[in-house]
Image: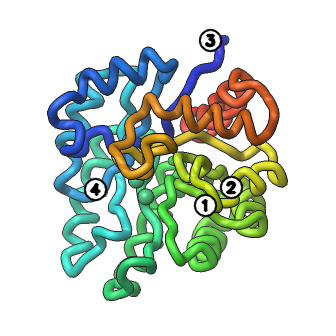
Amino acid sequence: MESAYIIDTHCHLYDEAFMEDRSLVIDRAKAAGVKRIYLPNIDGSSIDGMLELETDFPDFCYAMMGLHPCYVKEDFKQELKVMHKWLSIRNFSAIGEIGLDFFRDETFRAEQLEAFQLQLEWALEKDLPVVIHSRKSLQECIKMIKTIGKGGIRGIFHCFSGSVEEANAIIDLGMYLGIGGVVTYKNAGLPEVLHSIGLQNVVLETDAPYLAPVPFRGKRNEPAYTQLIATEIADSLQCSIEDIIQITCKNALQVFEPI
Ligand SMILES: [Zn+2]
Ligand SMILES: [Zn+2]
């Protein structure tokens, strides 16, 4: 078996924030030990750039397909049609990112729920993992995964930043927590949560270009910073960075490529 490596399970590398220096960003990621980057889709407009990256960097960039909850608008059924077509013509690593976001805006609450339900059904039909974006909506997400999935949904709650109880509710679903730059933010309380839950259900992510870890907080995030995230987790759990890489690599492969 190939030895363990860093997997960035959630990175918007196709974002225009990387327009100028994308290949340098990838070089730095590789130099930092990153061997896989999973690309969550946003909406119809992000598909081309995402698939281009996958073509240019095979066995390194892996595309998902899905409609992000913040981009569920009046035309969501049209958007979903595009996504469903893509899913019917080729394979994707996951359905993502999908979910519910009631933090910024609840205008399309009903539409978000409908889009989420439909995409969970796709995941079941195609036996694909899901990558969940949940803000101010954890209970609703969990309820829907239980109702629609009946135990058959697997995947990741990305950008986890909740409490021990919330973490355990996700673990009870048999799902994983994506831990990123937030773990380095003071007062975020994530190290304490990790202490309680351990690493069994943890995967690494950046969510780049967003949520850069300290000392780059507020600046552009990039996949090489998974090193900083892994180091922070290792420090707070008093184990080695090698342990963190090994366990999170195994977990991520378990999600995306179960044997
Ligand atoms: Zn997200
Ligand atoms: Zn994202």
**92 is higher (above) or lower (below) than 166:** above
- Does label 1 or label 4 sit earlier along the sequence? 4
- Does label 3 or label 4 sit earlier along the sequence? 3
Eye-nearest disc, 3 or 2: 2
* Amino acid residing under circle 4: Met
Residue 16 x, y percent position in the rendering: 19, 44
Which corner quadrant holds the C terminus?
top right
- Does label 4 or label 2 sit earlier along the sequence? 4
Rendered image: mark on residue 83:
4
Tell me the residue that label 2 is attached to: 190
Q: Secondary structure at mark 4?
A: helix
Tell me the residue that label 1 is attached to: 161
- One can see residue 258 in this view: no
* Amino acid residing under circle 2: Leu
Eye-nearest disc, 3 or 4: 3
Q: Are marks 2 and 1 in contact (CB under 8 Å)?
A: yes
